[in-house]
Image (cartoon, coloured by chain):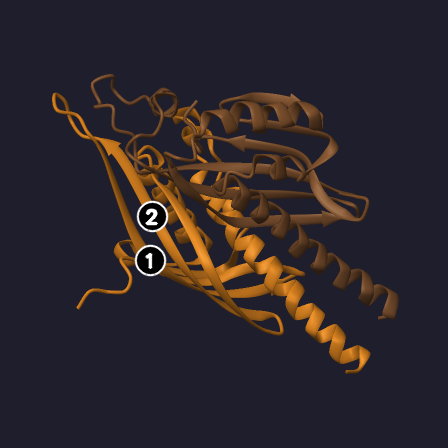
Chain colours: A orange, B brown
Amino acid sequence: MTLEELEKNVQTLEDINEIENMHRDFIYWLNNRQSEEWLNEIEFTKAIEYFTATAVIEMSSYGIHRGKHEVNKLLERLVSEVAFSGGRIIVTQPIIEVDGDKAEGRWVTYRFTEAPTSPPNTKLVLNWEQGECISGYVKEDGKWKFGSMKWTYPWPIPD
Amino acid sequence: MSLEEMQARVRKLQDIEDIKKLHRKYIFMLSNYQWSDMVECFSKNAVADLDPDGKYIGKEEIRKLIVGVIGERINPLRPKGGQILDQPIIIVDGDKATGIWFMNRYNSNDTTKEHWRIMKQYYNYPETVEAKPPQISRGKYDAEYVREDGEWKFHSLKWNFPWPRYD
């Protein structure tokens, strides 16, 4: 193997690591709501940095969202709705394929929610749902971002 | 690119994998009740801050925490469930590194009253909720790692449980 071939292989491994870190960082951000005040004051500028200006998100019941403005609106809605349901999202089992400055990733996702039922016979109810997230990644100014995201849940889709 | 620069890049990738291995091994040992072995994952001057037990500074204090407090609390004859560690974000900078991990805990029905009390406190569940804890609960690790005598160890380990919290 030549030094050039070795460099190409190393670059691919570095890209995979950076893509996985970016995707996980986004999920930590999505999960990390802490209080009503936090939710009211939050600025979505950090989250929007994970996406390209022309990014497209398709998310089962939320539909298709194109470009930063629509993506921003979707993120606000997502955080608001998940915030106080005791919910959290996990992404795991990544399969990342890199091709130069583009890449594709496939992840299995889990969305958990837990909440007490109404009194008087209050019980804690836990629900979970498996999903699939297929993402297109683009390297912009040396930084990996989401160019597209198709998040399907429940997954597999029941017949 | 020179061979030296390439070696440095490969070294960093290897470090990331070695650090993942350290943290996964630590959780494997937790699941397997290997309390003394867990202590060896910490550096000499490490800090462990593990909910709900608080902060312990230095390896010998950490031994008291893991062997004497956690090990005494968990009865291997009556398993309380298990845990899965996932979603690592590891950033390496020379002989130091940081890491974030998510961990799901799977609880059996006889999870301790103390565990349930903490969950109710942080999530503001009504007092009338029956004393049956959730089957799955979650936490987050914030870790600092250090290379000590050529081997990666915990320099600090913060276990945030439950996470996220509503303050």
Given the image, what chain letter belongs to the residue carrying mark 2? A
Residue B51 can be seen, yes or no: no
At 74% across and 57% down in the image, what residue appears?
Answer: B12
Pointers 2 and 1 in contact (C-beta within 8 Å): yes
Residue A107 appears at what percent x and percent y? 43, 61
Using the image, tell me which numbered label, if any, was put on residue A111: 2
Name the quadrant of the N terminus of chain B.
bottom right
Amino acid type of disc 2?
Answer: Arg
Q: Which quarter of the picture shows residue A61?
A: bottom left
Q: Which residue is mark 1?
A: A131
Looking at the image, the residue that sits furthest to the left is A120
At 49% across and 43% down in the image, what residue appears?
Answer: B32
Q: Secondary structure at mark 1?
A: strand
Residue A87 can be seen, yes or no: yes
Looking at the image, the residue that sits furthest to the top is B127
Residue closest to the eye, B98 or B73: B73
